[in-house]
Amino acid sequence: MPILLHEDPRYFRLGQGTFWHRMGYATSRVFITRTDSGNNRFNYSELLGNSLAVGVSNSYYPDSRNVGANFSKLSIQIATDALSNVLREFWPDVKRKLPFGH
């Protein structure tokens, strides 16, 4: 999806600022992305790609083919991606503070 929509799927660390600012930035990146031209816009590839993945999942698990189950799966996937961004944002800082992180 990112190639078709000219979006950059990578997460770019903020790396500075307050904890809450960085946390907000990291979680917002599931909704905001950079385009190939360097501008920010709604992250269509995140929503469309995860929606397609839920659709494929439904073809394998036909007993969960309803709107509620689909929305639940999509919400979990988006939350997982947001958590992944938070880990990417803070892991280098945590690693530096560990005794074996240098």
Image (cartoon, rainbow, N blue to C red):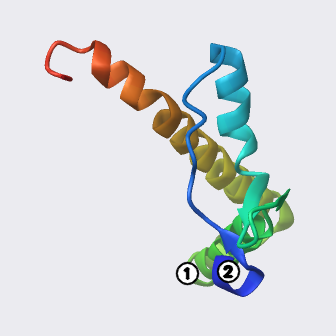
Q: Is residue 48 visible?
A: yes
Q: Secondary structure at mark 2?
A: loop
| Residue 55, x across and y down, in percent | 69, 78
- Give whichever of 84, 91 is nearer the camera: 91
Three-letter residue code for mark 2:
Met
Measured as percent of width and height from the top left, residue 102 is found at: 18, 22
Horizontal and vertical percent position of residue 3: 65, 83
From the image, state whether disc 1 or disc 2 is nearer to you.
2
Question: Is residue 58 at all visible to an observer of this figure?
Answer: no
Above or below, 74 relative to 15? below
Numbered disc 1: secondary structure = helix
Q: Are marks 1 and 2 in contact (CB under 8 Å)?
A: no
Residue 1, labelled with which disc? 2
Horizontal and vertical percent position of residue 13:
55, 40
Res 39 quadrant in image: bottom right
Q: Which residue is pictured at 74% across the width and 57% down the height?
A: 33
Amino acid type, residue under disc 1 in the picture: Tyr
Q: State how far apart marks 1 and 2 are (Cα).
A: 22 Å
* Residue name at image x 69 percent, y 78 percent: 52
Residue name at image x 59 percent, y 49 percent: 81
Q: Nearer the viewer, residue 65 or 3?
A: 3
Among the 4 quarters of the image, the one containing residue 16: top right
How packed is label 2: few (under 14 Cα within 10 Å), some, or many (20 or more)? some
Q: Residue at x 63, y 43 (%)?
A: 82
Q: Which residue, given by chain and number where applicable, does mark 1 sit on?
A: 60
